[in-house]
Image (tube, rainbow, N blue to C red):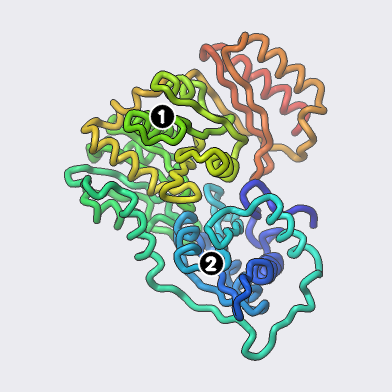
Amino acid sequence: MGRIFGTDGIRGTANIEPMTVETALRVGRAVGYLFRQGREKGKVVIGKDTRLSGYMLEGALVAGICSMGSDAILLGPLPTPGISFITQNMRADAGIVISASHNPYQDNGIKVFTEKGLKLSDALEEVLERLILSREIDSIRPTAQAIGKAFRVDDAVGRYIVHLKQTFPSHLSLDGVKVVLDCANGATYKVAPIVFSELGAKVEVINNSPDGSNINLNCGSTSPQGLQEAVRRTGADAGFAFDGDGDRVIMVDEKGNILDGDYVLAICGVALLKEERLSHNTVVGTIMCNKGLELALASHGGTLVRTGVGDRLVFDAMQQGGFVLGGEPSGHIIFSKHASTGDGIVTALQILSIMVSQDKPLSALSKVLTKLPQKERSLPVEKKPPLEEIAPIQKALREAEKEMGGQGRVVLRYSGTEPKIRIMVEGPSEDTVDRIMDNLEEVVSSWLK
């Protein structure tokens, strides 16, 4: 087995390597060994989304952790940012998330957090991967009283709900605000309705009946069409679609228009600029953020700093620069004063707080951003050779840049979690974008499929 960590932990089809009980057992042992903080017994938090395979992988992780003399604290279904929070809150040595995020139910994944609820650095990930794949710690076998135990924490959901409510300004209320929540039959199905209701909102919930196989199925942040219909049908003020593990959100305004993460960054960035609360007048985004976001921030004296794709890279840049807001068009948004990872519920609450404080509908707030024409496509690939070494692809990229004359961008990258290549084209007109996209798709397909 080669490298098992991708851009966001380990991920794949459940019960096929690397997402097998055998590998999960080794992950549990490696985490129990690596993150123990000099205690007599270590303490590792485990949470999951609603996939059927979560039970299987949870049991294997627990066995591995306990076999290394650490205790396993089981949270049950909880959003990824909630697991990050509980890891810190309970002063655990590490946290583990069993989830494949927005992927279909047959996939699953394992992500690891440090004791501070942070995703692993590249260096720490390499050490953990070495321990998982080697036989380096096979001989470490605590016995008798030194073996760990597993127990469930019944109030984890309650602790997280209190935390979430505290991120909403105490002088504001959601009384009179009607929202629709699409929980994607995933990890937010318990938490989200309670949070918004207790803050005073009138809540309509869809896709909150998980059965182990319907997570993300034609619903949630990757399929918000049902949310659009529900918002129009109920006359709601806004709708929010979460993904399977709750770390991202896509919005729908009161007119039924879909608003992605670029709109969140623009609305929140401009609001914070006006209130002089945006650190260094800077928002952190990725190479996938629309050029219009840069222009929107610049018109109010702000700046956009770009990183590679991935919320970990966004958070790293935020830490290094002392920035408070960052995110991705996919809906991963980080408010560093409230969380160290993307949190869909926190993001929705921040948007609602701006709507209430400014007494404006979401459609009016969204006018702060005018996007340049942009299209994205994902193509399946059987291999991932370095793109810079494929001459026809590089030629097509040069021709695209020449045609746009500096008024657009092309981003070509492999997915870090799936066997796909992503193509993003942004340009001065729809016709130009369509023409360049079709040409790139043809060239890429002929070389990588």
Closer to viewer: mark 1 or mark 2: 1
Q: Give the SS element for disc 1.
A: helix
Give the label on residue 56, or none. none
Q: Is residue 307 above or below residue 344?
A: above
Residue 175 in the figure: left or right of residue 231: left
Q: Residue at x 48, y 47 (%)?
A: 342
Label 1: few (<14), some (14–19) or many (≥20) C-alpha neighbours in 10 Å: many
Q: Name the spot of residue 446 as percent of width and height, x first.
A: 76, 26
Disc 1 marks a residue whose amino acid type is Ala
Taking the image as shown, residue 321 lies to the left or right of residue 182, namely right
* Picture coordinates of residue 397, whole percent (x, y): 71, 19
Pinpoint residue 346: horizontal percent, then vertical percent. 38, 48
Depth check: give the residue in front, 409 or 49.
409
Quarter in which the N terminus is drawn: bottom right
Viewer-nearest residue: 151 or 53: 151
Relative image position of residue 131 (x, y in whole percent)? 75, 64
> Furthest-bottom residue in view?
144
Mark 1 vs mark 2, CA separation in Å: 34 Å
Report the disc number at residue 266. 1
Circles 1 and 2 in contact, beta carbons < 8 Å = no
* Nearer-N-terminus badge (1/2): 2
Image point (41%, 50%), residue name: 338
Q: Quadrant of residue 192?
A: bottom left
> Which of the image's four quarters has the C terminus?
top right
Residue 237 seen by the camera: yes
One can see residue 217 in this view: no
The vertical placement of 315 against 359, above or below, is below
The amino acid at mark 2 is Ile
Residue at the (63%, 16%) spot, across then down: 436
Which residue, given by chain and number where applicable, does mark 2 sit on?
46
The residue located at (37%, 55%) in the rendering is 208
Which quadrant of the figure has residue 16?
Answer: bottom right
